[in-house]
Amino acid sequence: MSPLRKVRAVTRKELRQIGRDRRTLLILLFVPAFFLLIYGYALNFDIRHIALAVEDDDRSSSSREVISAFVNSGYFDLVETITSSPQIAPLLDRNRVRAVLVVPAGFGADALRGRNTSVQVVVNGDNSNTATTVIGYALGILATVSTTYEIQARVGSLAGPLVTLEPRVWYNPELRSTLFLVPGLIAYIAMLTAVVSTSLSVVREKEVGTMEQVRMAPISPLEYVVGKTIPYFVISIIGAALIVLAAMLLFELPMRGSWLLLVASVSLFLIGALGLGLLVSTLAETQQVAFQIALLISYLPTLMLSGFIFPIATMPAALRAITYVVPARYFLVVLRGIVLKGVGVAVLWPELTALAVFGGVILALASLRLRREWA
């Protein structure tokens, strides 16, 4: 047989094998297109629709012009109007706004008379990249406003701009990217390891033939799922604790909140991740397929659709809708809230509830799927 015929024979055999393995074929065809869509839409460094609150202590036509300049720029959305500085902290703690514009009393009179004046922008610094961009936008807007007032007041000999910006960055004054990236890495590593490790557990028993013995044992699918989850949960919680401690020692990650709440939050997140891995293991027939599926549903959503690197607000509406079923989205808010802001359950209860619901639903689905296999 000639080498060419041998190559053709191997090619035909491989094509038949790929055709029989429909799941692998689906992954090979679906993943590249899926990656293109996700990366194409999610990789967007332009930030729009920044939630803005305004404290207008001047209440003049000039202050309203400054506020209009921010809103009409296309970068900021006015979502809240406040009357005093103590109202700023709750808005930033609950992530209702990303920035607060404070116009001081006497701003309009000073600007119209050619006297130097300033406005303040308070920025949430838990995401250093976004905070830097927000300050850049504010500087550009105020530079335009300052030029307008300089022309009106006929002053061109000032050493600097007539209207200046006083940025105040909360939670991360130095805008250290480490404080933004490390919590995301904690969520990413914990999710990836938990899902992949448990996704192989049930499949392994299918491959070695011990699943038949388990089916004959006097144990319910739910009991089997819980029993499978506990060992991996203990290992994962130890691993997560080591990750957090290493981040604090090596990267100077602060701890401004409750340790007990942090442990509870990590536990809720891991329960959902472990349940997701078990659900994958009930769907796959081989460890190779289980590994591929687990990697796909844990790696990509946690990295791209959780707000870890790219702001969710910049994504199209369809992708924003998908992010609501990504547990890392809620876990990142909780983790940054506890570690950087020092807030408690009163602020974080919506995200904690979402994590608890996700974990319960996923474990229930895994047990139902296993019950169908045992029937």
Image (cartoon, grey):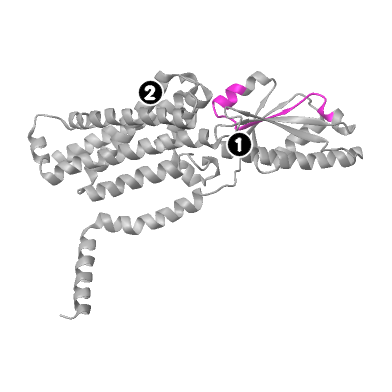
Neighbor class of circle 1 (other Cα within 10 Å; few <14, some 14-19, many 20+) is: many
- Outermost residue on the front side: it is 250
Vertical comparison of 338 with 212: above or below: above
Q: Write down the residue under mark 2.
A: 263
Q: Answer with the quarter of the image where residue 76 lies.
A: top right
Q: Are marks 1 and 2 in contact (CB under 8 Å)?
A: no
Q: Position of residue 356 (x, y in %)?
A: 36, 27
Mark 2: secondary structure: helix
* Nearer to the camera, 144 or 362: 144
Q: Write down the residue under mark 1.
A: 131
Kindly identify the residue that appears in the image at 25 percent across and 36 percent down.
366
Q: Which mark is residue 255?
A: none
Mark 1: secondary structure: helix
**Amino acid at circle 2:** Val
Kindly identify the residue that appears in the image at 19 percent across and 68 percent down.
13
Horizontal side of 327 relative to 25 (left or right) equals: right
Q: Position of residue 1 (x, y in %)?
A: 15, 80
Residue 279 visible within the image: no
**Amino acid at circle 1:** Ala
Horizontal side of 148 relative to 2 (left or right) equals: right
Neighbor class of circle 2 (other Cα within 10 Å; few <14, some 14-19, many 20+) is: some
Inspect the magenta stretch and tell me whether residue 97 lies in it.
Answer: yes
Inspect the magenta stretch and tell me whether residue 176 lies in it.
Answer: no
- Quarter holding the C terminus? top left
Vertical comparison of 138 with 59: above or below: below
Q: Answer with the quarter of the image where residue 369 lies.
A: top left
* Nearer to the camera, 346 or 261: 261
Horizontal side of 21 relative to 41 (left or right) equals: left
Vertical comparison of 309 with 110: above or below: below
Q: Position of residue 242 (x, y in %)?
A: 36, 29
- Sequence order check: which comes first, mark 1 or mark 2? 1
| Residues rendered magenta in the picture | 89-108
